[in-house]
Image: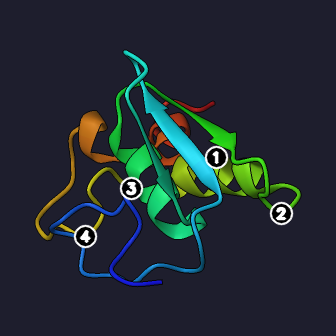
């Protein structure tokens, strides 16, 4: 594989963790295929998003991406203080609100 998967953000310095195995869709249906690593990062950075396995994806790939995204902060490669709800992971926000 040359380059990185389409779901890798240009400012994210990390490498792909395997081939593209899922598609991440935003609230209006625009999407990008990605490896599990970058797909989770993309999904975590969307206000509303969905993830679907590609036809040849390993079993459970979309679930793994969904679960990983839950614990990642949006744009997790960016430094700086993260205190606002929109800057925290879904899991962190649930914990803050006792859910």
Q: Looking at the rendered structure, which numbered label has been put on residue 66?
A: 1
SS for tag 1? helix
Residue 10's spot in the image, x, y percent? 18, 65
Task: Judge the density around disc 2: few (<14), some (14-19), many (≥20) Cα neighbours within 10 Å.
Answer: few
Q: Earlier in the sequence, mark 3 or mark 2?
A: 3
Q: Earlier in the sequence, mark 1 or mark 3?
A: 3
Q: Is residue 16 left or right of residue 83?
A: right
Q: Earlier in the sequence, mark 1 or mark 4?
A: 1
State which quadrant residue 56 falls in.
Answer: bottom right
Q: Looking at the image, do the residues carrying marks 2 and 1 touch, with CB atoms under 8 Å apart?
A: no
Q: Looking at the image, do the residues carrying marks 4 and 2 touch, with CB atoms under 8 Å apart?
A: no
Give the residue displayed 40% in from the left and 18% down from the top: 27
Q: Relative to 95, is 64 above or below?
A: below
Residue 66's spot in the image, x, y percent? 64, 46
Q: Relative to 24, is 29 above or below?
A: above
| Residue behind mark 2 | 58
The span from disc 1 to disc 4 (Cα, nearest Å) is: 18 Å
Give the residue displayed 33% in from the left and 45% down from the top: 45
Residue 44's spot in the image, x, y percent? 43, 47
Q: Earlier in the sequence, mark 4 or mark 2?
A: 2
Q: How many marks?
A: 4
> Of all residues shown, which one is farthest toward the right?
59
The span from disc 2 to disc 1 (Cα, nearest Å) is: 14 Å
| Residue behind mark 4 | 77
SS for tag 4? loop
Foreground mark, 4 or 2, reads 2
């Amino acid at each position: 594989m040359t380059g990185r998967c389409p779901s890798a953000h240009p400012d994210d310095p990390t490498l792909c963790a395997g081939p593209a195995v899922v598609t991440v869709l935003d609230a209006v249906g625009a999407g990008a295929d990605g490896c599990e690593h970058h797909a989770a990062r993309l999904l975590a950075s969307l206000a509303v998003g969905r993830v679907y396995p590609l036809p040849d994806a390993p079993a459970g790939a979309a679930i793994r991406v969904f679960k990983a995204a839950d614990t990642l902060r949006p744009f997790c490669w960016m430094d700086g203080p993260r205190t606002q709800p929109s800057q925290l992971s879904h899991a962190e926000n649930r914990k803050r609100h006792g859910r």
